[in-house]
Image: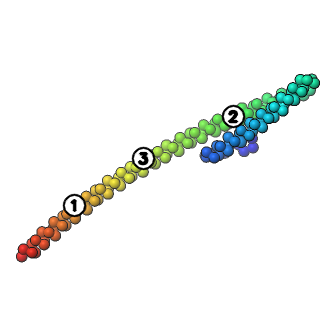
Amino acid sequence: MTGGLPSGGVSRHDLDAFRAELRRDLDDARAWIGRVDERVNRIDEHGSRNAGVIAARVSGQAGDIAEIKAEFRAHLGEHRRQQEAAEARLARAAEAAEENRRQARRWMIATVFTAAGVAAAWGSLLWEISRHVAGR
């Protein structure tokens, strides 16, 4: 594996790229193991020349694959935790925005009723003044 995992937050694209890289690495390892298997079969036909070296390489590859798998699972778990935290933050922000809209509506309604009351009071005052002036 050449790239490895990034150390910071991970986007869906990065995770998909990592999965694709992991699949390529696993396919390469499977192909290599297939070639080794062919060599081992040939060795079985012609004797055990270098069988220990080949067995060590196969064991090393199996360990590498297990390490990659564990690293991927840990990375995926961290990605899921980060995703859940981001979703929780978004939910809190949406709730706060909704509360702000509710408060704004309440203030608007109170302002409209207050303005209507003030207008009614001024209208009543002007009505009384006009009646008083006309009645002179």
> Which quadrant of the structure image shows residue 2?
top right
Q: Circle 2 is placed at which residue position?
A: 69
Kindly give the residue lying farthest to the left in the view shown: 136
Which residue sits at x=75%, y=37%?
Answer: 27
Indicate which disc, 3 or 2, sits on the residue closer to the N terminus.
2
Please provide percent x and percent y for residue 64: 75, 34
Left or right, 82 with reference to 114: right
Indicate which disc, 3 or 1, sits on the residue closer to the N terminus.
3
The foreground one among 1 and 33 is: 33
Q: Secondary structure at mark 2?
A: helix
Left or right, 116 with reference to 87: left
Q: Circle 1 is placed at which residue position?
A: 117
The answer to whether one can see residue 13 in this image is yes
Q: Mark 1 is on which residue type?
A: Gly
> Which quadrant of the structure image shows residue 117?
bottom left
Q: Secondary structure at mark 1?
A: helix
Q: Circle 3 is placed at which residue position?
A: 95
Q: Mark 3 is on which residue type?
A: Glu
Report the quarter where the N terminus lies.
Answer: top right
Please provide percent x and percent y for residue 103: 35, 52
